[in-house]
Image (tube, helix red, strand yellow):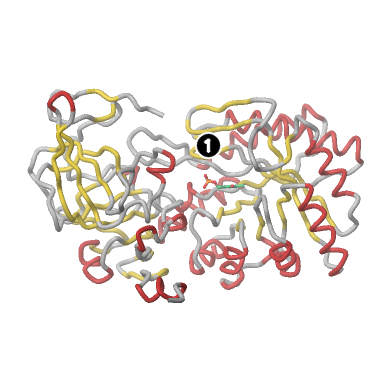
Amino acid sequence: MNNSHVSPGSFTGTSPVWLKEPDDVNDLMPHLWSQTAEKRDGDLYVGGLSIPELVANVNTPAFILDEDDFRSRARAFKEAFAPADVYYAGKSFLCTEVARWIDQEGLCLDVCSDGELTVALRAGFDPERIGYHGNNKTAMELRRAIIAGVGRIIVDSFDEIERIGAITAETGTPARVMIRVTAGVEAHTHEFIATAHEDQKFGFSISSGDAFGAARRILEHPGIDLRGLHSHIGSQIFDTAGFEVAARRVLALHAKIAHELGHVMPETDLGGGFGIAYTSQDDPKPPVELAAGMREIVTQECRGLGIEEPHLSIEPGRAIVGPSMCTVYTVGTVKQVALDGGHTRTYVSVDGGMSDNIRTALYDADYSATLASRTSDAAPVVARIVGKHCESGDIVVKDEFLPSDIRPGDLVAVPATGAYGRSMASNYNHALRPPVVAVKDGVARTLVRRETVEDLLTTDLG
Ligand SMILES: *Cc1c(COP(=O)(O)O)cnc(C)c1O
């Protein structure tokens, strides 16, 4: 994380070192935006539609989902990793129509709650191609998943093994499971940490022997089919070095279970976490490069261990939906705030905030933004885009160059908000969660409507 700040000479304010003044502040930086996004006379267009005209109807804030972009990213992962299976991580963003797109593009789907499973089944998604995650699935959730015929349940605790064993015995319906293991690798962005121990709630540790013990316990249940091991090492990862260490440890355990327990597991899942570009700092690799790297790692390790290569699967969420959505806000107020050293910071307040994008507050995440409703000849200033919530940490974009004449009524758009934006949205301050509007070939379709005050009052019994 780059938190060092410098005082640039050409304007007042402070900004991080990586943030470079653009040649023309009106231009989009193409690799941050979905593929059909463009500027025409200062107006942002996505899917062939003028975003200012669109939000005149649907209002702001709004998530705009570029359908062609989403589908082509899903397809790119599917094709690059074939014959491996690609499970789209539904927690990044899921609604009924998006589940259909995933199905139509031939991907599989991960869910991690009864709510997500309900949406998937409502979309007609084949349960065989659904994976079910979670460190504390209830007996009710497990029973429903098993009866629905979910293709694999990723088991996370000894308690869960007993719970699944009891359900399969009682219902006579078998369950297919994978063991979530922690390989002692934690990867984020450009670095990974490899330790022997993991202090976290997910999974069974390989190094402590718990993961092996889980396999032994599962094999004692006749109704449970142990399909393989599962490892997920982090998020916003840009290279395959962390996956290499994790794969080595995971595949060694495959071999140990085969030798000592006589059970050959046919599958391995190496999880998700592939990074995307939020700002000019980020330079993600295309899926073909990731796929080639991961294939080679698995092939080499299996050859070294003398075991057959298990069928591989991966679980990208952010890398598919992240870049395909942007959020459009209306500017409400602009304030110059005096800082130490004679600097000022321009605070641009918009009509959403941490209720539609918690990532800046939660992870100190960086985002970008552009003026989306006109061109400006005014000199650029480094602005901070903040929300309307009662919380000083309610920041959407920490630092971005915007025209210095930015004013109330302007639209600003923030790219790469598709993952963990709407899906982590809250009703803080009784905010109404924004809609998701899909655009394609000049046509807009609302997939998730804006909440209303009636929606809020429905659960408040008065
Ligand atoms: C969150 C998660 C993913 C998806 O992560 P992304 O960073 O969105 O790719 C995949 N697998 C598991 C187990 C996860 O928890």
Q: Give the percent coordinates (x, y) of residue 217.
A: 87, 46
Marks counted in the figure total 1
Q: Nearer the viewer, residue 77 or 242?
A: 242
The residue at the point 53 percent across, 37 percent down is: 289
Q: Nearer the viewer, residue 102 or 82?
A: 102
Q: In the displayed structure, does residue 68 sit left or right of residue 290?
A: left
> Which quadrant: the N terminus?
top left
Q: Nearer the viewer, residue 143 or 249?
A: 143
Q: Quadrant of residue 216?
A: top right
Q: In the displayed structure, does residue 61 sit left or right of residue 262?
A: left
Q: Is residue 194 above or below residue 442?
A: above
> Which quadrant: the C terminus?
bottom left
Residue placed under numbered mark 1 in the picture: 289
Q: Secondary structure at mark 1?
A: helix
Q: Amino acid at mark 1?
A: Glu
Q: Is residue 112 above or below residue 118?
A: above
Q: Is residue 263 above or below residue 8?
A: below
The residue at the point 71 percent across, 68 percent down is: 144
Q: Residues within 10 Å of mark 1 (few under 14, many from 20)?
A: some
The residue at the point 61 percent across, 58 percent down is: 111
Q: Residue furthest front?
A: 462
Q: Give the percent coordinates (x, y) of residue 319.
A: 48, 47
Q: Quadrant of residue 445?
A: bottom left
Q: In the displayed structure, does residue 163 sit left or right of residue 35?
A: right
